[in-house]
Amino acid sequence: MTVKDYYYQHFEELGPEKKFHFATRMKNYFKTHDFDRYLADNRPSDNLAEVLNNNDFSKVSNYILRKPFFEKYDGVYGVEATLFRVHHLLAEYNFDTRTNFLELYPQDSLYKLADDLMRDEEALRILSTWAVNVIYLTEELFPRGKNVIRELSEWALRLDTKTCDPTLMSYLCTHIVLCESSFYKKNLLESPNLKILRKLIEKDAAVVRDNIETISLDAAIEFLVCCNMTGLDYPEIRAAISKICKGFKKDSPYLINYRRAKSPDSHLRTLSGAEHINVLYIMSGLDADNY
């Protein structure tokens, strides 16, 4: 049985947020209608204040490294999550809550946060996904005519990877790519930014290759997903990641990232806790390759 089949069969055992994540990834990446009924019947709450006020970032990966920057940009954790909620409601349900968001978080404050993050190179490197997502979603939802994907890409391409945490560097590159795809909804082969996105993936390839034994497995597999979307292939890196995945999956019906889930009682070993890496595993094609 493939991991995809297993998650389909045990879908009801996932928590609500994990169900939504899995269903939208299957829908947007594979263009399936398998979860249309579920998504139609389970629209996320439009209580944006509740999302915005949740600023507990204690469970993020690389917590110690990132903590000073979450504190420097107080509230960015909640802002990022709320922008995602606004995005999902609009993209998946054509339900527009942008005005509601601005009543809670003024547009001038949002633009200032996005601009401050764009100028703060250290915060960009360390916050990585959170910073990129805030900058992109601000422009997507409240456009000012900026090509933030190109700006972020040009900056990331100038970085000396030897001075960066490998996992955060990899996530920086892949999330710029994922943002350009509007989180798997757009065909990147038709993107006007495709050329520079491919350069980003080429840069990330070196990071993944040079750190294959230690880099977060989630980041490594996400790199393969971005390769698929941008029409690139690195057979040796793919084979190396596939080998690691086979070793981590041999005692489980789904993939467990033992690099992060080191303790036997780790939530990341559960079906819900491992959902993120397994969605990436399915989308990367490794699931089908290893079946």
Image: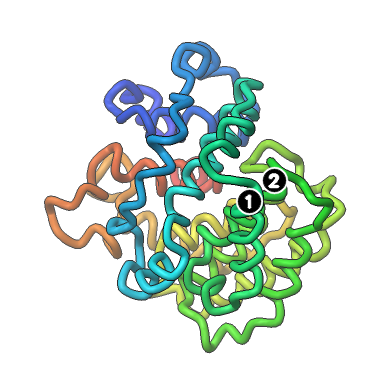
| In this rendering, position of residue 117 left or right of residue 146 | left
> Front-most of 286 and 113?
113
Dot 2: within a 10 Å radius of its alpha carbon, few (fewer than 14), some, or many (20 or more) residues?
A: some
Residues at marks 1 and 2, CA–CA distance in whole angstroms: 5 Å
* Res 181 label: 2
Helix, strand or loop at mark 1: helix
Give me the residue at 35% from left, 62% from top: 61
Q: Which amino acid, mark 1?
A: Leu
Instruction: Specify the quadrant that holds the N terminus.
Output: top left
Q: Which amino acid, mark 2?
A: Ser
Give me the residue at 52% from left, 88% from top: 163
Residue 53, placed above or below residue 245? above
User: Is residue 208 visible from the viewing direction of this image?
Assistant: no
Please give the residue where the numbered disc 1 appears in the rendered image: 178
Res 95 quadrant in image:
top right
> Mark 1 and 2 residues: CB-CB less than 8 Å, in contact?
yes
Res 218 quadrant in image:
bottom left
User: Is residue 42 visible from the viewing direction of this image?
Assistant: yes
